[in-house]
Amino acid sequence: MNFGLAFSYQFQDPDWIKKILLNGLITLIPVVGPFYLTGWMLEIASRFAKSDDVLLPEIDFGKYISKGFMAMVIGLIYMLPTLIIILPAIVVPMIFINNGDDTVATIMVILMICCYGLGLLVSIAAGLLQMVAIVEFALKDFKAAFQFKTLFAIFKAAIGPYLLTILVAAFGVPIITSLGGIACGIGVLFTAPYSVTVMASMLGQAHRAGANAQVVEL
């Protein structure tokens, strides 16, 4: 994985200022703005999943809003197992809320610990696979986001790049975005979409590393 490239490839595009600022403005549009930016990110990620020679995509409302919306649907589906697991810990205590029996109270506590603990593990696993899934979707189709054997194989073959991507998402992206607070917050119009381009590059590069490893094994 070319870590430095994720932060520098944007400036190789002659129109990088226009593209980044326009996408920053589009993000401000209620409801559809975040969908658009997500779709734009997936377009970049899918390009990096094929090659390092990537320029920032041009504006395409219909295409990127659609991609962003479908990515949200995929995310919701990946959340379902976690919600199902923790549901008993929410519903059952509500049913026995007025029961003063100590045994019942103990069982409720154990149930909550087990459900929330298992739910946490499942949510982490789902989140990791989802990183692979959304790029597979962008490269292929909706069904590809749920080919779990393929997703796991790609992630397993590129654990290092994906962990690096997670670290950048957890620490690097918030720092970059927070810099936009300079100039009365106007800078966010640049730093927010720029941080998205960084994440897109890393997701795409990680995906390519995992996919290429599968080809080599074959």
Image (spheres, rainbow, N blue to C red):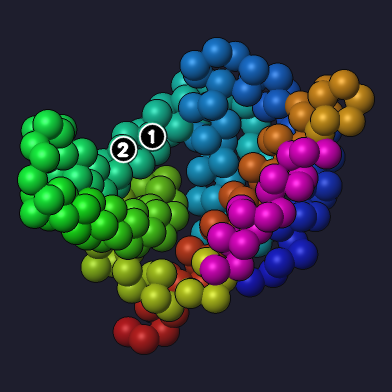
Q: Position of residue 35 (x, y in %)?
A: 49, 27
Residue at position x 91%, y 25% in the image? 183
Q: Residue at x 65, y 58 (%)?
A: 168
Q: Are marks 1 and 2 in contact (CB under 8 Å)?
A: yes
SS of the residue under disc 1: helix
Q: Quadrant of residue 21?
A: top right
Q: Secondary structure at mark 2?
A: helix
Q: Which residues are magenta?
A: 163-179
* Whole-number angstrom distance, CA of label 1 to CA of label 2: 6 Å
Task: Identify residue type, mark 2.
Answer: Leu
In percent of width and height, residue 64 lies at 50, 29
Residue 42 magenta: no
Query: Is residue 218 visible in the rendered structure shown here?
Result: yes
Rendered-image quadrant of the C terminus: bottom left
- Expressed as whole percent of the image width and height from the top left, the position of residue 148 reads 25, 62
In-front residue for pair 197/105: 105
Q: Which residue is mark 2?
A: 76
The amino acid on which the numbered mark 1 sits, given as a three-letter code, is Met
Q: Which residue is mark 1?
A: 72
Residue 66, picture quadrant: top left
